Amino acid sequence: MQRLIRALAVLSLFAAATGPAQARNPWTQPGHLRLGVLRTFDNLNPLISGQAATTDVAQFVFSGLIRFDDRGEPIPDAATVVPTRENGGISADGKTITYHLRKDVRFSDGHPVTADDVVFTWQQDMNPRNNVPYHFPYDQALSVTARDPHTVVVRLRAPSAPFVSNFFRCGTQGAILPKHLLDGKPDLNHDPYNTKPVGSGPYMVTRYDVNATLEMVANPYWFGGKPGLERVTLRVIPSENTLLVSLKTHELDFYFSAPEQQYRELKALPGISVSAIPSSQFEMVVFNAGRAPLSDLNLRRAVASAIDWPTIARTVYLDVDLTDWGDLFPRSWAYTAQPDPTPFDPAKARALLDAAGWKPGPDGIRSKDGKRLELEIVTVAGVITRQNAEVLIQQQLHAVGIDLQVHNAPANLLFAPLGAGGLFASGKFDLGIYAWTKNPDPDDTQTASPDYIPPKGANYARVRDAKVGELQRRATATYDRRARKALYAQLERRLGEVLPFHTMVWRANVNAWNDDLHGVKPAQSVSDFWNVGSWTL
């Protein structure tokens, strides 16, 4: 009998070790991830969205040809390999890129994903009727063709090192759309597909209450095998304080992108894992050079010199993040440390304003030709850190004679494409605070090129500088990293001279999650949900 009892005990232990994971926290709902995010969505169709929030959702619902891992390295998604010269994916002249598709990729309705879907998606990106936020890098292709059902051939206008990993990376502009569902439509701007998209990622949308709740379940056709979660409920909660409370009361399992101010409190919560991984997402102040008075470079320099950048990093972002002034990630292979061309210097700011003819009035606010020096600043409503930064910037600009008014708005209004009236795309702002997530490749053509003013790109600052464009073209045309690094050092200096923006910090994205959730590997680039198909709860 004792032998039988011991045998049963061993079997019991073996079953516990090999069977389904046992939840340790009483609030855990095994297989059901409850995720909370702050930002609203302008669209669930990645083709006509420029939001990082849509890129994050795309990791659940869609596939690209490639995606980026937690180290910022491109890895295959629907493609079998990332093209290189060594594997024959990049031609000798650097102008032909060949992608080979896996043969087991299906959309969540069971329809196979083929090269025709990739070609169709590229055509939709280039369709002028679609309100796409930008055409880069897809407009660098002279042609995109299907050699056979599983081979896509791209012919480039010129060699482009960043194109290989930017073309159809999973996320905005890079998710593969289903031709069999969308072919023949004049445009996709208001198609029902945009609120219940069909993709080939690990999960599929079952319900979307606009900017409230998104319900997803496992995609039975996912080529990666059975997804680790059975169900995902994503809730849009436009208040960081409410998100924190919801995590504390266990209504949420995952609080995504918390503000730095909550980091220490989150770390103290029992049963919660917290990460703060430095990422290639930079928080910046953008200066709109497309309209007066910031069309005057000296005024942009005066504003930048009046802002106490180190104090903002220390008191608003609480030294959780990396600090630097430019748009090259300090941990990138392409980074070269260089001094800030517009460091905090209120005396210099006043001198620049005096020289530009802006004289202080009785209340201290400057005026010129009878017009007060009034500017407005915008950011995503409800983001605590940015709102705190606005308050400091408002005080600092007031000290040199500039009246700064705060007019914030929801993310879906700020970042909507030009055709949909987005405030940044249409240039209806003076100063803006937002984050941009750079791909691991250092190319910034999309955000700083003189050729990529909206609607073509996301150069919201509207600085049109020929030297910037020339350096960008030279840097992208070579596949040699040493040569590119030297060119990006020159480009960074030039951006500091013409001043489209000034970075405040490189965000250490703060995430907090139920420690029964396994597989989370926050990334330094693109999306912390890059491997969400393998998460388990």
Image: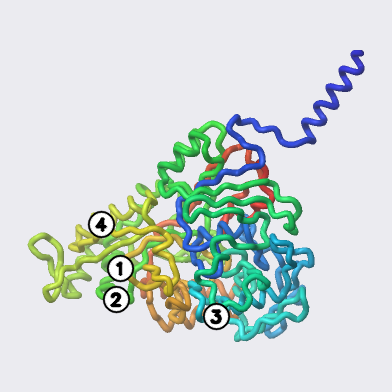
Tell which of 60 and 394 is nearer to you: 60
Viewer-side label of 3, 4: 3
* SS at badge 1: loop
Q: Image quarter for residue 428?
A: bottom left
At x 40%, y 42%, the residue is 241
Disc 1 residue type (three-letter) = Asp
Of the numbered discs in the image, which one, if any, rests on residue 127?
Answer: 3
Q: CA distance from mark 4 to mark 2?
A: 20 Å
* SS at badge 4: helix
Of the numbered discs in the image, which one, if any, rests on residue 291?
Answer: 2
Disc 2 residue type (three-letter) = Arg
Q: Residues within 10 Å of mark 4 (few under 14, many from 20)?
A: many
Q: Residues within 10 Å of mark 1 (few under 14, many from 20)?
A: many
The answer to which of marks 1 and 4 sits earlier in the sequence is: 4
Residue 3 rendering spot, x and y as whole percentages:
92, 17
Disc 4 residue type (three-letter) = Gln
Check the image and name the residue furthest to the left: 362
Residue 262 rendering spot, x and y as whole percentages:
43, 41
The answer to which of marks 3 and 1 sits earlier in the sequence is: 3
Disc 3 residue type (three-letter) = Asn
Q: Is residue 491 left or right of residue 292?
A: right
Q: CA distance from mark 3 to mark 4?
A: 41 Å
Q: Image quarter for residue 68?
A: bottom right
Viewer-side label of 1, 4: 1
Which residue in the protein does label 4 denote? 394
Q: Are marks 2 and 3 in contact (CB under 8 Å)?
A: no
Which residue in the protein does label 1 denote? 430
Q: Are marks 3 and 4 in contact (CB under 8 Å)?
A: no
At x 57%, y 68%, the residue is 441
